[in-house]
Amino acid sequence: MGGLLAAPISAVQANSKYPEKPISLVVAFPAGTTTDAVGRIFATELSDMLGQPVIVENKPGGNATIAAKYVARAKPDGYTLFVTSNTSHSAAPWLMKNVGYDPIKDFTPIARGGNLPFVLLVNPGVAAKTVQELVALAKEKPGSLTYASGNSTGILAGATLGNRADIDILHVPYRGSPQALTDLIGGRVDLLFNDLTSSLPFIESGQVRALAVSTADRSAIAPELPSMQESGVKDFNLVSWNGYFGPAGMSPEVVERLNTAINEIVKKPEVRDRLAKLGFDAFSSTPAEFEEFVGGELVAWGKLIKEAGIEPQ
């Protein structure tokens, strides 16, 4: 009886000392991507707040599944954390036949980080300055326009545009967004849904033309751009979200400590300014709110992927 009572007490005492050593923050994408840049800002801030180094580990590949599997199998002691996006938790389970993890059961939701708006870009040589003009052009010449993709959001956004607007556009997949963007600039493909962050320099230089953001409403980061729904494409709302997880079974006390820290970080004006310059709309949530959001997004992306006729590979 005494042994049974002692275990929870010792666990609480251990958790009250957290963290006692460096923390690993696993990033599901390569260095230089927006998720990596955002993760490094949070890692620095978390290190200051928690009093221990937070070391970023990049484990890209497999539609973010390599990193997800690594974290899912880690010890749930709060020393292996995961910053990821809709790619690993909303899209990959539907785009791949076997991701090797359960996006809900194998993780502990800690906090939502914010949203990364995606924008519909066209090569300036395409005779369309609005989404309506692009749709009309595609209907005039079915199958003549090509859309590139460098990630799961790009794949689904292009397929959803074709489905919702009832147009025939040819998909050209790429291994990553930089290559897709390079070919869009070079005129080898006609359109691309890409994250606003990496797109901004090329929009400002006139090398690509931005038509709309992929979310239901306008983005605070680029308020001058209409949304896809505002542009006449019904039920179009793709959110590239960012959030923090740990392996399943983490201590509630450790989760609360991390959640409180992340919420405090996103309230800092200087941090929000740095993130905004990356094209990142920062905000957070409680673990319960994040868990509900992730579950809803998994269902929503599955529905969109099936409606778009995308078969798992």
Image (cartoon, grey):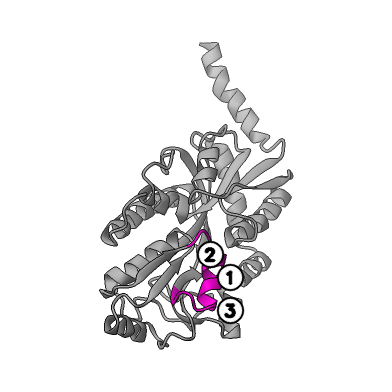
Q: Of marks 2 and 3, which one's residue comes earlier in the chain?
A: 2
Q: Distance between the residues labelled 1 and 3?
A: 8 Å
**Magenta stretch holds residue 247:** no
Q: How far apart are marks 2 and 3 (CA)?
A: 13 Å
- Front position in the image: 117 or 270: 117
- Amino acid type at circle 3 is Phe
Viewed as shown, does residue 122 lie left or right of 282? left
- Asked if one can make out residue 75 in the rendered structure from this viewpoint, the answer is yes
Q: Distance between the residues labelled 1 and 2?
A: 9 Å
Q: Of marks 1 and 2, which one's residue comes earlier in the chain?
A: 2
The answer to whether mark 1 and mark 2 are in CB contact below 8 A is yes
Which image quadrant is residue 168 in? bottom left
**Magenta stretch holds residue 186:** yes
Which image quadrant is residue 44 in? bottom right
Residue 113, position in %: x, y?
Answer: 54, 57
- Front position in the image: 236 or 275: 236
Disc 1, SS: helix
Residue 268, position in %: x, y?
Answer: 65, 63
Which image quadrant is residue 144 in? bottom left
Please report the bounds of the magenta region as a residue range.
Answer: 174-191
* Mark seen at residue 198: 1
What residue sits right under mark 2 in the picture? 177
What residue sits right under mark 3 in the picture? 202
Viewed as shown, does residue 177 lie left or right of 230? right
- Amino acid type at circle 1 is Ser
Q: In this view, does 97 lie above or below 136?
A: above
- Front position in the image: 283 or 132: 132
